[in-house]
Amino acid sequence: MFKTNTRNCALMAALSTGLIFSSVFRTEIANAASDTADALATVIAAIAIAQASDLDFGEGVQGDSTKVVAASTSENSENASFNISVEGIRAYTITLPGSATMITAGGGTADKEIVVNTFTSFPSGTGALSVGGTQLLLVGGTRAALASNQMAGSYAGTFTVTVVY
């Protein structure tokens, strides 16, 4: 009977251990789900700017005062014009230069240079393109007064207009 008790105890211990392990390390079937999504993008054409006419201050006599060319609401023989184009209907920001210098005979001295500043534009600050995706941007500025000893001749300089959307 002693052997039976030992066997029964061993059997009981094995069953108890199995129950403990099955309680502690009970495996369950995981419940998981997944789904997918698309990655999307639309590429639009870059904004474009094309110079159509120059800012022209015309003739001035030595000693003349400043001359202002208005951006105006329509193109004329003095204001600079640029064609702006983009895809679709878009708003854009206009950045004008702080100043530019026109020179003659190589420049380098005050009597061979004329400063242009106070640039303005129409539209001013921002533009909005219509369904056709194009707009005329007009630019004006102020030519500095001419010195009494300003060298006679043709003066030219460049300035940059930037548009961003």
Image (spheres, rainbow, N blue to C red):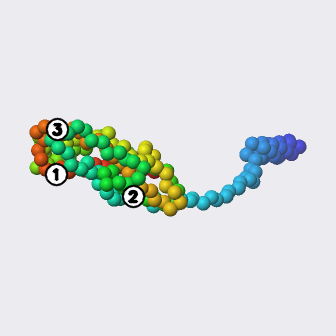
> Helix or strand or loop: what does disc 1 sit on?
loop
Q: Which residue is mark 3?
A: 63
- Answer with left or right where residue 123 lies relative to residue 161: right
Say above or below: 160 vs 142: below
Q: Position of residue 100 (x, y in %)?
A: 25, 44
- The tag on residue 83 is 2
- Viewer can see residue 57: yes
- Answer with left or right where residue 69 lies relative to residue 16: left
For label 3, the crowd category at 10 Å Cα-Cα, with few meaning under 14, some 14 to 19 and many 20 or more, is few
Q: Nearer the viewer, mark 3 or mark 2?
A: 3
- The tag on residue 27 is none
- The residue type indicated by label 1 comes to Ser
Q: Position of residue 145 (x, y in %)?
A: 21, 38
- The residue type indicated by label 3 comes to Gly
Residue at 42%, 49% (x, y): give it.
73
Distance between mark 2 and mark 1 Cα atoms: 26 Å
Q: Earlier in the sequence, mark 1 or mark 3?
A: 3
- The residue type indicated by label 2 comes to Asn
Distance between mark 1 and mark 3 Cα atoms: 16 Å
- The tag on residue 154 is 1
Between 6 and 43, the residue placed more toward the observer is 43
Q: Earlier in the sequence, mark 2 or mark 1?
A: 2
Q: Position of residue 125 (x, y in %)?
A: 43, 43
